[in-house]
Amino acid sequence: MRDVAIVGIGMSRFGKYPEKGIKDLVREAVEPTLSDAKLNSKDIDAAFVGTAAPGIMTGQEQIKAQVTLSAMGIDTIPMYNIENACASSSSAFNLAWTSVGAGLYDCVLVVGFEKLFDKDKMKSFMALGTAVDIESALQHLEEFQKKHALNEKIIEEGSGHNRSIFMDMYAYYTRTYMERYGLTQKHFAKISVKSHKNGALNPHAQYQKEVTLEQVLQSGDVAFPLTRMMCSPICDGSAAAIICAKEHVSRFTTTPIWVAGSVVGSGKISDDLSDTLTSRLGPKIFETAGVGPEDIDIIEVHDATSPSEIITLIELGLCPGEDAPKWIDEGYLELDGKLPSNTSGGLASKGHPIGATGMGQIHEIVLQLRGEAGKRQVSEPKTGMTHNGGGILGVDAAAMALHIFTR
């Protein structure tokens, strides 16, 4: 494999934009990316575009890359349409990295976008709800409940109507971690406060306002222990990057960010909550990148809910489970902490336009490693990581992509 680097990035502000179409969203990310890399579209050998639900939300299917990119004059080159639930654009990045590393292309564009907001919330919930095994999802949950003799239902009344069904799944999984490690709802509220504080410093974030612990706890119950401010909001958005082989990097930038490792994995149907896709895939990315958990200076994780942030860090081996309450209480995840996490504000504050989320995470890590993150800049990070998952298979995540970057 050839060494591969990111030489340009761009991103729209995540938010609710009923007046914008998918072409508008893609343009808002790609144009600044081309400018950042100091190249024009003729330098691009191929494009990899990740998105999850435009068919349901807009009716556009099959040629999403060709439709959105040709509208801004990028055409004729090979284009790949990648769909992999919330991990769509990070999976697209993995394929782009593989193609450049293998020598198939020298310089490629990676884009993630999603048009998820609609005035009809049921339409958005329906789109999110398709990231499960439609035929067997409820059966798998019923069998899991029976096998573990649960006195509670995982999917409660109202799920899929006034909230995404994923919130019920996250809530159940979170409660198991509360019992195991002594975590409380207040701990998760502290993570949410931290995320919103970081988001307030991020011009690309959907929510740019700090909140208090009390505001988070009183923001409305979703599914215990989750409150509304602990849950990622539905939104639209896009993010993009240009990556190229080492021998071409000097044409575009003097501050390349190197892709040390990239892995993609899929879930499995299991009733073992300790055997998760995150815990299985983590060792693979560290082996691929040639680093260990102790080498990670900064990370963006898939916090579809605030508890997911600390749970992910535990499953990746970055935070000892028994120390999780201490890490939260003593600010280890803050910008000046031991392991700054979700410096962008994460999904909970930055927003979660599902197909764009993975590239949005990569955008943040690149800014941080370049030292260009402004008021939320971490002190001299050298190695950054992204964790982006999506969908549910049984009780496991269905799709996931992990990346490690170095400066």
Image (cartoon, rainbow, N blue to C red):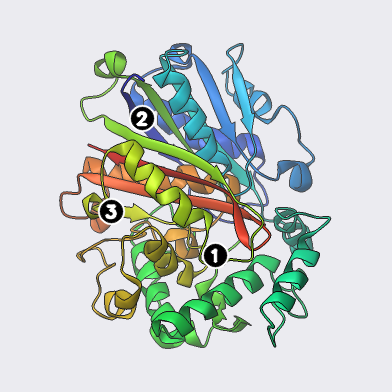
Q: Which numbered dot is residue 8? A: 2
Q: In x, y percent, where is residue 142?
A: 77, 72
What is the spatial separation of the Cα atoms under label 3 and label 1, in whole angstroms? 26 Å
- Closer to us: 49 or 263: 263
- Residue 104 versus residue 196 in the image, above or below: above
Residue kind at label 2, given as amino acid type: Gly
- Judged left or right of residue 153, residue 298 is left
Q: Which residue is mark 1?
A: 232
For this orientation, the residue located farthest to the front is: 147
**Tag 3 residue:** 293
Residue 182, percent from left and from top? 40, 85
How packed is label 2: few (under 14 Cα within 10 Å), some, or many (20 or more)?
Answer: many
Q: CA distance from mark 2 to mark 3?
A: 27 Å
Residue found at x 42% / y 56%: 301
- Left or right for 121, reference 70: right
Look at label 1 and name its amino acid: Ser
Q: Regarding mark 3 in the picture, which secondary structure is present there?
A: helix
Assess whether mark 3 and mark 2 are in contact (beta carbons under 8 angstroms). Answer: no
Residue 329 placement, left or right of 363: left
Q: Residue furthest right?
A: 135
Residue 353 in sight: no
Kind of residue sitting beneath label 3 = Pro
Residue 211 location (% of width, % of height): 40, 77
- Residue neighbourhood size for the residue with mark 3, other residues' Cα within 10 Å, grouped as few (<14), some (14–19), many (≥20): some
Q: Looking at the picture, tell me which residue is in the foreground, 147 or 27.
A: 147
Q: CA distance from mark 2 to mark 1?
A: 27 Å
Whether tag 2 and tag 1 are in contact, CB under 8 A, the answer is no
